[in-house]
Amino acid sequence: MDFSTDFIEQVTQMFVAELEGQLQQQADVKIAKVEGTVREMLREVGAQCVRAYLTQQDEVYPNPEIPCSCGGMASYRERREAKILGVFGWVSYRRAYYLCSQCHVGQAPLDSRLGLEPGKVSAGLAPLLASAGVSTSFDRSSQQIQRYLLLDVSENTVRKETQTFGQLQMAVEQEWIADSQDPEVFRERHRTVQERPRRLYGTLDGAHAPLQTEWREMKVGAWFEVEPIPPEQVPAYRRAQVGETGALRAKDIDYYCDIQQAKEFGALFWATGCQHNADLAEELVFVADGAVWIWNLVDLYYPKAVQIVDWYHAEEYVTALAQAAFSDDADKAAEWQNGVCNDLWEGQVTQVIAACREFEAHPSQAGQAAKKAISYFTNNEKRMDYARFREEGYVIGSGTVESGCKQIVTHRLKRSGARWSEAGARATGKARAAWLSGKWDQLSAKRADLPLAA
């Protein structure tokens, strides 16, 4: 908003006069004290402004009756006081209150018009509390809110608002799922879509979260595109790793998650893909680790997609076998590992499997590591044509979704001492995913509509 220069100057002079009066008796005043005092003044003035504005917005002469949603008429009773917890603290105000003689439900037109919920958090404060709640534990969020906004807010209030945002995201996803399974919506989208993605990436993974009675896997997915990183921004060690593709990074990442079995998660997997026109993409590429449930879903929903097993996961199987087979000779382990990894890098998976079979019969840990590696490479051979993938310019690492798992599950849900209800973990995870995906403004708008929809 733009405010007039005269208004700003008048308010500033009033603040400066009050500030000097507050600080003149204090010795050795530093800038921190000055800024802290101004913050407190702004909070108090803000609360008074909101209070006065709300009071002035009510009707001076209330109507004796107003229509009720039940079909009857509600009669005016009194100007009743209410309060809300907003960005400037608790604010009380008075407004006209009506009571219906038929359904005996009370209502205040001002509350409905401005989206006010008496006794609750305002729609202006809610996104701030929830953004803190998706970033760190609820008790620490409460402490941060006190420092940032000078508000004493309980951790339960932060939890409620955070999980409300997750529930809003869940509701949006249910709409997506319904649309993705509606033949008419599906046909209309295919008729009207103008721009189809040229090359769209998808990826899936999972990480376990601590629930109250058990650990459950939260499945995490992401849709994204890629762009080259300028050469001067790429460290030398990374240039060697990414090889002929040059350095690529994900952009426009959109995360989603849920605690579900793979079959149920498939509905969200398909629905989010429809939101990104994955089924209409000129080229669709999936990069993930070798988990069977991932590739079963990809085969079911996107059978024509390019499938790539993450290079770094594949490389780990070679490393583990080298360390087990040559545990007493680091040089031989490195020599064998480098040779096999070179074959893998060139997509020579048959040679990699043959090299692993040399240790399959060993009764030691080397035999176990060899069997695991052989199974992994055999099951994913077609997804390891790394020479061709690099030539086509594909990303061959699943770091995007691994980052999502860390940011959603490890950093938020697996905090020390955390034990979640399933509903709480799902809601908090979804709110965190929405925050990471840049959807906060959309959810904030939906949160602002909640009183009106009630």
Image (cartoon, grey):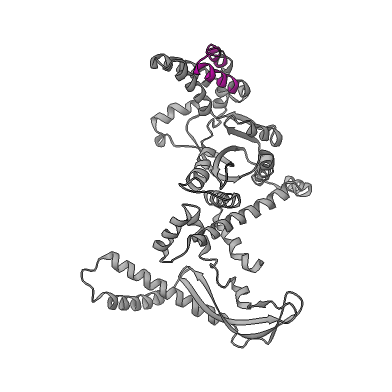
Is residue 3 inside the magenta stretch? no
Specify whether 191 is left or right of 163. Answer: right
Q: Quadrant of residue 118?
A: bottom right
Q: Quadrant of residue 302?
A: top right
Residue located at (51% from left, 77% from top) = 92
Magenta stretch, overall SS:
helix
Classify the position of the C terminus by image quarter: bottom right
* Vertical comparison of 92 with 32: above or below: below
Q: Where's residue 30, x and y in %? A: 25, 66
The outermost residue toward the left is 28
Nearer-the-camera pick, 315 or 240:
315
Specify whether 397 is left or right of 263. Answer: left
Residue located at (55% from left, 40% from top) = 208
Q: What are the residue bounds of the magenta stretch?
A: 352-376
Q: Quadrant of residue 261?
A: top right
* Vertical comparison of 217 with 173: above or below: above
Residue located at (63% from left, 81% from top) = 97
Nearer-the-camera pick, 342 or 216:
216
Specify whether 231 is left or right of 189. Answer: left
Q: Where's residue 218, x and y in %? A: 58, 42
Q: How many marks?
A: 0
Is residue 371 inside the magenta stretch? yes
* Vertical comparison of 333 with 98: above or below: above
* Vertical comparison of 68 with 141: above or below: below
Specify whether 199 is left or right of 331. Answer: right
Q: Where's residue 417, x and y in %? A: 47, 48
Q: Where's residue 37, x and y in %? A: 33, 70
The outermost residue toward the right is 184
Nearer-the-camera pick, 245 or 186:
186
The outermost residue toward the front is 213
